[in-house]
Amino acid sequence: MNIIFFGPNGSGKGTQGSILKDKYNIAHVESGAIFRENIKGGTELGKKAKEFIDKGDLVPDEITIPMVLDRIKQDDCSNGWLLDGFPRNKVQAEKLHASLEEAGIKLDIVIEMLLDRQIAKNRIMGRRLCAKDNNHPNNIFIDAIKPDGDKCRVCGGELSARDDDQDETAIDKRHSIYYDTDTGTLASSYYFKDLAAKDDSIKYFTLAGEKDLQSVTDELISKL
Ligand code: AMP
């Protein structure tokens, strides 16, 4: 099962994505997380990516596209993958499509999480990452997933906030890229929506992201 999951930064697609990962036993490929691991590990890739990430800019396509296309051909993706954070612009969408065709890899599901930009911004600023699993949902502004004091509500792990989640200018830039329907992430989502309209074997559906976590999960499961 191969899935692309679109949604604005802060919409909760990482949390929902990890539910799909467990349901289908597939790899959760998060481009942002790959960059963060590289930054943490002090790699060359991490050093290059950091300057863009800190400002809320996209890491250039010549770095990002081969990185993700190689990643989905690794062994742990043989049972399927869920792409989260990629593609993020129209060029990435076209290259992904061409690469899948070339490799004979089938795309099964495309999900677009809908969420108002201001709500997404508030959610980003309240988001906290668990040191043990960054998909454990913790947000200081959402009652249902408030951390347990300063610890992860799921496992008690240490929590931290991402630097780019606390910088309003960086958040605004990330959202301007996401909501851009000409060349940005929504353009990329609509690229796959058009493909799905012509190809019955690809399922494309939207999810209402403003509901609480459990309701979004219920809608997701009912639409799969
Ligand atoms: P995210 O964790 O998805 O919010 O991504 C964090 C940051 O990583 C983004 O703001 C970008 O700087 C970079 N990034 C993640 N995915 C991509 C992508 N597909 N293309 C370019 N840059 C990306």
Image (cartoon, rainbow, N blue to C red):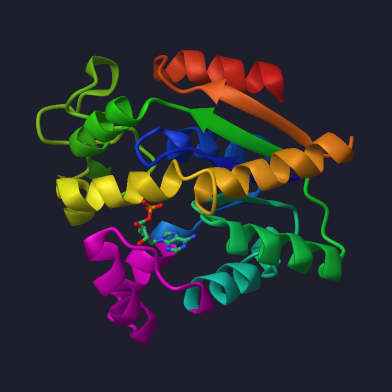
Residue 73 appears left or right of 161: right
Q: How far across and down, in percent of the image, does residue 72 sit?
A: 66, 64
Using the rendered view, name the quadrant where residue 65 is placed: bottom right
- Residue 186: x, y in percent? 54, 43
Q: Residue at x 68, y 39 (%)?
A: 110
Toward which corner of the image does residue 178 lie, by quadrant?
top left
Image quadrant occupied by the C terminus:
top right
What residue occupies the far bottom of the structure in this picture?
Answer: 44
Residue 40 in view here? no
Residue 20: where, in percent of width, then height? 60, 36
Instruction: Give the overall secondary structure of the magenta segment.
Output: helix
Q: Left or right: 20 with respect to 109?
A: left
Determine whether 49 is above or below 196 in the image. Answer: below
Q: Please provide percent x and percent y for residue 138.
A: 26, 32
Residue 16 sits above or below residue 133 on the image:
above
Is 45 inside the magenta-drawn segment? yes
In this view, the residue in front, 174 or 65, is: 174
Q: Which residues are magenta?
A: 33-62
In the rendered view, tell whether residue 44 sits above or below residue 181. Answer: below
- Asked where in the image residue 219 lies, by quadrant, the reply is top right
Residue 71 inside the magenta-drawn segment:
no
Name the residue rendered at 43%, 65% in the picture.
34
Q: Quadrant of ligand 1?
A: bottom left
Q: Is residue 131 left or right of residue 189?
A: left
Q: Of residues 154 and 170, which is closer to you in this image?
A: 170
Residue most toward the front? 182
Quadrant assignment for the N terminus: top right
User: Left or right: where does residue 101 sit relative to residue 54?
Assistant: right
Location of residue 51 with respect to 160 vertically, above or below: below
Out of 19 and 65, give the one closest to the viewer. 65
Q: Foreground residue, 172 or 107?
A: 172
